[in-house]
Amino acid sequence: MEGSHSRYGPHIDYVDSYIPVMMTSMNTIGKQIASLKTLVEDMAKYIQRQEESLSYIAGKIHDHERHTQAAEASLKSLPPEEAPNTFKDALETHSTTPYQASTMPNGQPEKGVKTLCFSMNGTIPAT
């Protein structure tokens, strides 16, 4: 008999030598899959937070629209001599709820939100 072979022949010995390598590779792949699963879960949490933020902002926009409509209705009922000079004045003076800066759920002001002041003819003054 040439060389040292198991009773099953040289091919089985060759395959047996690769089992530890295959197990190591499978272990590495398992770790990568677990890492990807964690990444996907983190992304899902991030998307959920973004959806909550967008929902909150949409609610603020809706509240602002209702507030604006109430101020506009109040303005229309005023005689011209009592009408305020700006739309913001109208919101502050003739609305049932005071005008205030928007805040996020954590109580901090929303970043990048600017209050526009409209003239009585509906144009936006240059800033």
Image: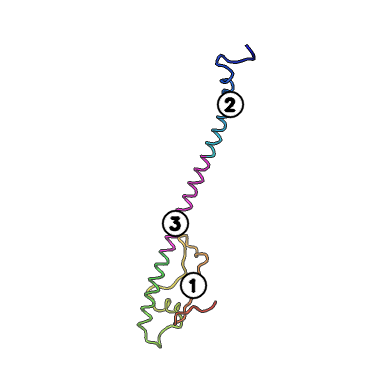
Report the side of 60 relative to 35 (left or right): left
Amino acid type at circle 3 is: Glu
Which residues, given as a range, are shown in magenta?
Answer: 33-58
How is the structure coloured here? rainbow
Residue drawn at point x = 49 percent, y = 48 percent: 42
Helix, strand or loop at label 1? It is loop
Residue 6 image offset from top left, x and y in percent? 58, 15
Corner quadrant of residue 65: bottom left
**Label 2 vs 1, first from the N-terminus:** 2
Residue drawn at point x = 37 percent, y = 86 percent: 79
Could you tell me the amino acid type at mark 1?
Answer: Thr
Q: Residues within 10 Å of mark 3 (few under 14, many from 20)?
A: few
Q: Nearer the viewer, residue 86 or 6?
A: 6
Which amino acid does the dot numbered 2 rest on? Tyr
Q: As rendered, which of 5 and 102 lies closer to the eye?
A: 5
Name the image quarter holding the N terminus. Answer: top right
Where is 8 relative to 120, above or below?
A: above
Position of the C terminus, as image quadrant, is bottom right
In the rendered image, the vertical position of residue 92 relative to residue 113, given as above or below: below
Nearest the eye: 50 or 85 = 50
Mark 1 vs mark 3, foreground winner is: 3
Q: Specify the label residue 115 is tagged with.
A: 1
